[in-house]
Amino acid sequence: MNHAGMLLRGKKRSRPVEASARCQEEVKFKEVMVYLVEKKMGRSRRNFLTSLARSKGFRVDDVLSDEVTHVVAEDNQAGGLWSWLREQGLRDISKVQVLDISWFTESMREGRPVTVESRHHIQETLAETVCSTPAAVDNVSQYACQRRTTTENHNKMFTDALEVLAESSEFNENEGRCLAFRRAASVLKSLPSAVRSLGATQGLPCLGEHTEAVIEEILQFGRCFKVEEIQCDERYQALKLFTSVFGVGPKTAEKWYRRGLRSFKEILNEPAIQLNKMQRAGFLYYRDISKTVSKAEAQALRCIIEETVHWIMPDAILALTGGFRRGKEYGHDVDFLVTTPELGREEGLLLHVIDRLQDQGILLYCEHQGTTFDATKLPSCNFEAMDHFEKCFLIVRLYEDQVEGGLQRNPGDSRAWRAIRVDLVVPPVDRYATALLGWTGSRQFVRDLRRFARKERRMLFDNHALYDKTKKMFLSTTTEEDIFVHLGLEYVEPWQRNA
Ligand code: UTP
Ligand code: MN
């Protein structure tokens, strides 16, 4: 180890014990990593079983990663468990034990992982084996909330191109076109296989003539000239670069561009430009926070946040949301929801959490926004606006030894930590389900849930509530499942919401 490394290590050890992010319970069975399937089991039971297992020294993964050795499902024999498993993109599914809850219950009773017997195994049903070949594409809904979109995108070639077109339309303030391209990309993402001919897109919703032309060009030439033209455009390049800075939106980016600025150096050397606090942090930590966050890094942060929140309030409820809840391998930040079992006890909690992170010396940036939530102002028709819950936008320092497998590094980088963007949102518990659904996203999925609610059900849905305009009443929503039921939609699992 080099000298700098030793110095950093020494410093790291002197941090208070609670600050280190090792999860609370002691791991007794290193060779076992359990994953509990939420389907049929339900979220609250899954949470309960997770805590139980962890308290007995079992490792339980919240996401189905390649580390998982034992997948445990409840009453899933005919429930499409295997088809679902195959869609998860595991490196080698044959290495995973797929087990009935009885294995789990017996293991809990014994206080150790019991030997797997054949009666514990969940067998793949014949129907599932037969159905695992891609189905013909028909009846694709125009609403993303009626499609199942995993992280596996078979049409990346097309959706990447459409994403550039959407972004460029956004920079040109052409919202209609931007949305049209995003909707088209979202439909293509949901398809079970790659589009190989224009004919294959027949009957698909949301594919306008521009999109068809893009698909046709890519099918024929392997590239789209309009997209390449945009990518070479000076204005597009500058706006893309500027908006990649935390705290810089399209408006500010445009302002800088109009001043003739083209690079970060020019911006930072321009005396007339006053950066706000967020933008200063954005530039200061640019190298770190413009890099993606891995699942392992997100998991390490979850431990840190969990430990901090529970140190203050042991029964507070914490949920990982955003892209990582949808099973994404990489994200641009890590999003969490925090609430309390009893209404009102969440008041002041977030400020405590912030203080505590500060005390641990890992808070690099913090913008706190107090709640502006007012139940008497509901329902709101203001769809795309930010929600009113108390929240904070953070930049947190994450150390090498807190991450399984280590940090993702830039070549030649020997620093023992990296900076990561973290969002914490605190809805009151009676708003938890709507907030969870909203913050789990994806943006397109939630946008279409709202559109579906409004157009098909005469209901208003946002992060705060679900309102029935016909009955003129709010509908009670304790879980995400409740919301789908009220909307008359089939439940879509978080990992199927990558629209
Ligand atoms: P993110 O922007 O973090 O997206 O917002 P993401 O899906 O996690 O993707 P990456 O991996 O970080 O890039 C998470 C969700 O939170 C919602 C967004 O709609 C998105 O679905 N959100 C964001 C809100 O509901 N309200 C907000 O004020 C901001
Ligand atoms: Mn996110």
Image: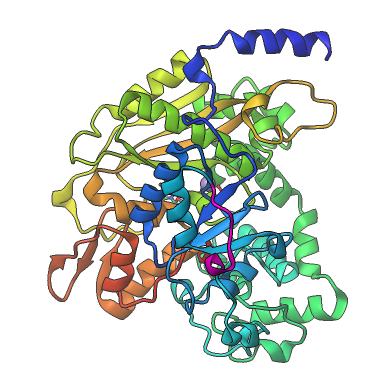
| Quarter assignment of residue 128 | bottom right
Q: Residue at x 41, y 48 (%)?
A: 109
Task: Give the percent coordinates (x, y) of residue 218.
Answer: 80, 75
Task: Give the percent coordinates (x, y) of residue 150.
Answer: 58, 66
| Quarter assignment of residue 145 | bottom left
Q: Which residues are magenta?
A: 113-121
On screen, 478 above or below 351?
Answer: below
Is 66 in front, or is 450?
66
Q: Residue at x 66, y 49 (%)?
A: 67
Q: Residue at x 57, y 71 (%)?
A: 84
Is 109 in front, or is 49?
109
Is 124 in front, or is 11?
124
On screen, 391 above or below 416?
Answer: below
Q: How is the image coloured?
A: rainbow
Task: Give the percent coordinates (x, y) of residue 60.
Answer: 52, 46
Q: Is residue 62 magenta?
A: no
Q: Residue at x 79, y 21 (%)?
A: 414
Quadrant including the C terminus: bottom right
Is 205 in front, or is 213?
205
- Tell me if 395 is positioned left or right of 484 in this view: right
Question: Is most of the magenta stretch helix, strand or loop?
Answer: loop
| Quarter assignment of residue 458 | bottom left
Quadrant including the N terminus: top right
- Tell me if 416 is positioned left or right of 170 in this view: right
Marker count (numbered): 0
Q: Is residue 115 magenta?
A: yes
- Tell me if 41 is positioned left or right of 57 in this view: left
